[in-house]
Amino acid sequence: MKAYYRLLLAVTLSTTALGGCISHSKTANVKADQRDMPIRVLMVGGGTSHDFNRWYKQADGNTLSMDNLCRVIYTNNTDSIPYYLAAADVLYLATNQPITLAGRNAIFEFAAAGKGLILGHPALWYNYKDWPEYNLKLVSGGASSHDSYGSFDEELVNIKHPVTVGVAHQFTLKDERYHYILDPAGPGIEVLANSRAANNSKVYPSVFVVKNPKARIVGIALGHDAASHDIADYRLMLRQAVKWVADR
C-alpha cells in the first residue's frame, strides 16, 4: 500500500511539473505571436495651424501602415482617447486641442504602465496652461516659439540609436524650426538630432528620447507639412521610433 501511494505521488508531481512547462511554453508562444502582430497605434490629431488629416491621418498613417508594421486608428476627437487607448500599444499625440480630464488621466496611466508614446510636432508646444504636468513629465520641456517657415539642417547626434540608425547623418528640409527648451525640473532628454539654421546660431533638439521613468517616449519636432512628412529620413525615423517605443 505504501508503494502504491509513493507511485501515486510521483505521478502527481510529474504531471504538475509537466503542466507547468506546458503553461510556460504557451506563454512564451503568446508573447512571440504578439511581437509578430502589427503594432496598435492610436494617433490623436486635430486642432489649429496644421493640416492634421493630410499630414498625420493620411501621410503618417500610410507610412506606419506600410508592410503591415502598424494598425493605426486615427481620431481628432480627444474625448475618445480613453476608449481607444485601452487597446493601443503606442499613443501618437499630434494634436494641440484641449484634452478632457478623463483623457489626461488615461494618457498618464498609459505612460505609467510602461507603454510607448510618440510626441509629434504640434504636441511639443506649450499648449496647456492648465495642465503643466504634461510638458513637465512627458515632454520634459517644450516650445513656445519657432523660426519662420524655411530651410534648416538636421544633424544627427546619435547615429546608433534604434530610432536614427540608417538615417542620413545630415539632411536639409523646410519646416517650422521649433525652439524646444528643456525644463530642468523634468526627467531630462537624450538628444538624437538637432536643428541648425543659417540665420540663427541657436541649436535646438528636434528628435529626442524623454527619460520618463516608466514609458518609452520619443519627441519629433519636425512635421509641419509635406517637406517633412514626405521625405525618406523623416518616414524612416517615424517608423523606427514607433517600433522602439513599442519595444519591437
Image (cartoon, rainbow, N blue to C red):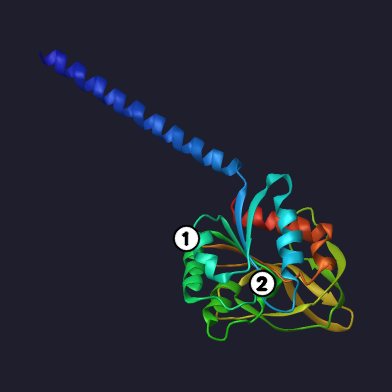
Disc nearest the viewer among 2 and 1: 2
Going from the N terminus, do you reach mark 2 or mark 1 first? 2
When the figure is inspected, residue 87 is found, relative to residue 119, above or below; the finding is above
Secondary structure under the numbered disc 1 in the rendered image? loop
Which percent across, then down, holds residue 145?
A: 73, 85
Q: Where does the image place residue 32, in percent across and percent down from the top left?
A: 55, 39
The residue carrying pointer 1 sits among few (fewer than 14), some (14 to 19) or many (20 or more) residues within 10 Å by Cα, namely few
Left/right of residue 167 with respect to residue 96 in the rendered view: right
Left of 169 or right of it: where is 243?
A: left
Q: Mark 2 points at which residue?
A: 46
Local packing at callout 2 (Cα closer than 10 Å; few below 14, some 14-19, many 20+) is: many
**What residue is drawn where x is 59% and y is 54%?**
246
- The residue positioned farthest toward the left in the image shown: 1
The picture places residue 201, in percent across and down from the top left corner, at 84, 83
| Amino acid type at image mark 1 | Ala
The residue depicted at 80 percent of the width and 70 percent of the height is 225
* Left-right relation of 58 to 24: right
Q: Report the quarter where the N terminus lies.
A: top left
Judged from the image, the secondary structure of the residue bearing numbered disc 2 is loop
Residue 15 sits above or below residue 2 on the image: below
Per the image, the residue denoted by label 1 is 113
Residue for point 30% across, 23% down? 14
Closest to the observer: 42 or 17? 42
Q: Foreground residue, 44 or 130?
A: 44
Residues at marks 2 and 1, CA–CA distance in whole angstroms: 26 Å
Amino acid under disc 2:
Gly
Residue at the (79%, 63%) spot, across then down: 229
Using the rendered view, name the quadrant where residue 23 is placed.
top left
Where on the picture, by quarter, is residue 200? bottom right
Occupied quadrant, residue 36: top right
